[in-house]
């Protein structure tokens, strides 16, 4: 029994009526049968029980379903995933922006290195990469290439986007920097290797 305003509502009867409405089966209870008959639209051949519930019961049911859906929704929120899109800074002070990841996991962006193996003036350079999407459990692996616009070199990065218990994202990467050599005899010294750790730069809006 539930009190709703000044009207007393019998919830077992309400729930019986709702259950029958869902299956379109009429009541076997005499008292309810009379009520359903009285409430059925005169011209309808198949009574629509749900639309004939008293207004107060409809309101109560709506509120109940709303609270239930909110409670269920709170538990079924998808877990946060590590997301490459955004602004990042690494342990050398280099910055990069990943602007978009498409449906195939292909992404692009720009990179501004803080250091260089050359004496050239450093300029923003484009990057292109791919995110692995299979079985990543929200912490995807990825690879990207930076094609330096101010030198003859190219760098490939490979890494993984990690998410800690506080939701903080970290990109752990390893890179190979290939410099151009004038002749094959110098090939042995053409490639540098290293690691970089990137953390997200929060934009002003976030
Ligand atoms: C060059 O020196 O020819 C181009 C710039 C290379 C910068 C390297 S790439 C790996 C490491 N991580 C950075 O952020 N910058 C350096």
Image: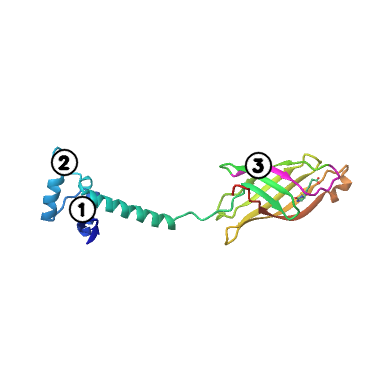
Does residue 64 belong to the magenta stretch?
A: no
Measure how far apart labels 3 and 2 are at the Cα level: 62 Å
Q: Position of residue 167 (x, y in %)?
A: 57, 58
Q: Which mark, by number, is residue 108?
A: 3
Does residue 108 belong to the magenta stretch?
A: yes
| Rendered image coloring scheme | rainbow
Q: Residue at x 71, y 50 (%)?
A: 157
Q: Secondary structure at mark 2?
A: loop
Give the mark nearer the N terminus: 3 vs 1: 1
Q: Secondary structure at mark 1?
A: helix
Residue range in magenta is 105-120
Q: Which residue is mark 2?
A: 41
Q: Position of residue 99 (x, y in %)?
A: 63, 42
Q: Tag 1: Cα neighbours inside 10 Å, few (<14), some, or many (≥20)?
A: many
Q: Position of residue 37 (x, y in %)?
A: 12, 47
Residue 47 appears in which quarter of the rendering?
top left
Q: Which residue is mark 1?
A: 17
Foreground of the two, 202 or 147:
202
Measure how far apart labels 2 and 1 are at the Cα level: 16 Å
């Amino acid at each position: 029994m539930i009190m709703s305003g000044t009207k007393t509502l019998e919830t077992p009867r309400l729930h019986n009526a709702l259950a029958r409405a869902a299956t379109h089966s009429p009541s076997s209870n005499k008292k309810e049968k009379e009520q359903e008959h009285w409430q059925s639209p005169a011209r309808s051949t198949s009574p629509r029980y749900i639309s004939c519930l008293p207004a107060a019961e409809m309101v109560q049911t709506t509120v109940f379903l709303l609270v239930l859906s909110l409670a269920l929704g709170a538990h079924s929120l998808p877990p946060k995933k590590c997301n490459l899109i955004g602004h990042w800074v690494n342990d050398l002070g280099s910055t990069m922006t990943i602007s978009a990841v498409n449906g195939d996991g292909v992404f692009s962006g720009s990179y501004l290195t803080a250091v260089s193996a050359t004496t050239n003036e450093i300029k923003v350079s484009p990057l292109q990469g791919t995110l692995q999407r299979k079985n990543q459990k929200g912490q995807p692996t990825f690879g990207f290439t930076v094609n330096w616009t101010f030198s003859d070199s190219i760098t490939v990065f490979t890494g993984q986007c990690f998410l800690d218990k506080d939701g903080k994202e970290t990109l752990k990467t390893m890179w190979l920097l290939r410099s151009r050599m004038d002749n094959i005899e110098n090939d042995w010294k053409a490639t540098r290797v290293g690691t970089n750790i990137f953390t997200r730069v929060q934009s002003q809006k976030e």
